[in-house]
Amino acid sequence: MQLPESEYPDGDEIAERLANIHALTDSTLTRLDVDDLLTELLARVRDILEADTAAVLTLDEHSDELVARAAHGIEEEVRQGVRIAVGTGFAGRIASTRTAVRLTHVDSTTVSNPILWEKGIKVMLGVPLLSGDAVLGVLHVGRLDNRPFSEQDVELLRIAGERIAAAIQSRQFAIERVATRLIERSLLPSRPPACPGLDFAARYVAAAEHTVGGDWYDLFTLPSGQLWIVVGDVAGHGLQAAVVMGRIRSALRAYTLLDAPPERVLDLVDSKVTHFEIGTIATVACAVVDPPYDAMTVAIAGHPPPVVAEPGGQASLMEVPTSPPIGTDFGSQRRSETIALTPEAVVAFYTDGLIERRGESIDVGLDRLLKAVSPGPPDRVAGDIMRRVIGASVPQDDIALVLVRRVASPPQN
C-alpha cells in the first residue's frame, strides 16, 4: 500500500530518525542487564517509528520456537510466555524467510498470537534479528490505527534490528562467559582427597580467547576407600558445553557407586549421554586405584592415554585399549588396562589442550609432554610440564592436568 506523497517523511526527519536509531546502543545503556536493555531499546524503537507496540522474540533452537523476551505496549506477550513456531504466523514467517514482513490486516488469518489482534493492532512490521546467516529472533512493531508502515520504516526497523541483535549477542556473551566460569569453578575439586601413600597435583588453565570449553577433572574416593581419577573434555564451547560437562561429571560419579569397573562406568555414561544429551560428544579417561594404591586400572573413551614415569626410566604413554568417545552409543565393549604403581611412579592425566597446536601434528605435542614428565613431587612435575609444554605460547583451548604419585614410604599412623 502506497502512502500519499505528503505523508512521506522529509529528508531532515529521516536524518533525525536515523540519528536516533544509531543512538540505540549508546553508553548510557551499558549498565542494564539483557532484559532491561531490550525493554529500553524497544521503548526507543516505538518512539522512533511512531508505533504503539514493540516486541522482541528470541529463537529457542531446541524447540525451533520464538519465545517472547521483551515487549513495550504488549507486555502480555512476555508475561504469558508466548511461543510461536518458526514458519507459523507473522513472526514465524519472518524467522523462516529471514525477510521483513508488513501487514495491513491483523487477525487470526495473518497472526497466530491472539494477543495482537485482541489488543486492537491494525498494522504491523517485523524484521529478523540476524547474526550472519543465523536467526537470533524477530523484532516487530505495531500501530493501533490504519496508518501503514512505509519503505523508510522498513529500513529504519532493519537498522534497529541490527543494533539490537548486536547488543543481545554482546551482552549475552558476557553473561554466559561469567556464568560458565562460575560453573567450571564450582565443579572442579577444591582439594584432593586424603589417600595415604599418594600425592596429587592439578592445573586448570582457560583458553586465552575466553571461549570456555567443557574440560574438567575430578578426584574422589568411594566409601570403600577406592580412588577415582577422571579427566574429560566435552566438545564445544560456552555455557552449554559447561552445563553438559556438569551433567556428565555427576552421572559418572553416580555410576561409580554401583561398584562397577571403569570401563563399565564409561559404558553407562555413554548410554545416558546418547539418550538424554543427543548430539553431545565427550572424551574421558578414568582411573581406579584400590587401597593400598599399588595398582591402577584405566579405561579410555576417545581420550589421550595417560603418561607414566617411573624412577630410572623414560616417561611413556600407557598402553590402554582405545574406544570411541562418549555420545557415540558404543555399547558394552570397552576394556581397561591395569598397571602396577611402583614407588615414586608418577602418572599424568590431561586434556588435548595441553598437547594440540594449530598446524602441528599431535605427535609433536605428545613427544613434548613425554620429555616433560618425570618422577618427583607432583607440584614440581606439574610446574615442569606447564613450563616446558606451554611456555610462552597462548593456549587456544582449555587445559586440565592431573598428576598422581605413589609415595615410596607412606606416612605411618
Image: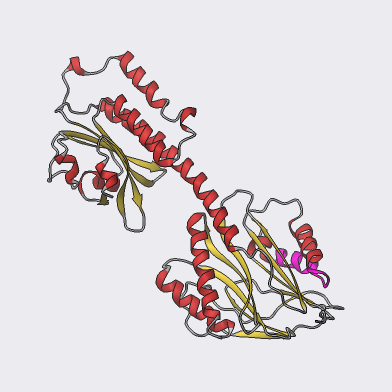
The residue lying toward the viewer, choosing from 331 and 212, is 212
Q: The N terminus appears in which quarter of the rendering? A: top left
Q: Is residue 340 above or below residue 180?
A: below
Residue farthest along the right direction in this orientation: 312
Residue farthest along the front direction in this orientation: 413
Q: Residue at 36% x, 32% y: name it.
A: 160
Question: Is residue 109 covered in magenta?
Answer: no
**Region of the chain picked out in magenta, as a range:** 363-378
Where does the image place residue 374, in percent across and percent down from the top left? 82, 71
Where does the image place residue 242, in percent across and percent down from the top left? 52, 59
Q: Is residue 48 above or below residue 190?
A: above
How has the structure been colored for display? secondary structure
Left or right, residue 92 beside residue 302: left
In which quadrant of the rendered view does residue 126 lie? top left
Q: Tell how many labels.
A: 0
Q: The C terminus appears in which quarter of the rendering? A: bottom right
Where does the image place residue 43, in percent across and percent down from the top left? 33, 30
Q: Residue at 17% x, 35% y: name it.
A: 121
The residue lying toward the viewer, choosing from 335 and 268, is 268
Left or right, residue 137 beside residue 34: left
Q: Is residue 410 above or below residue 383?
A: below
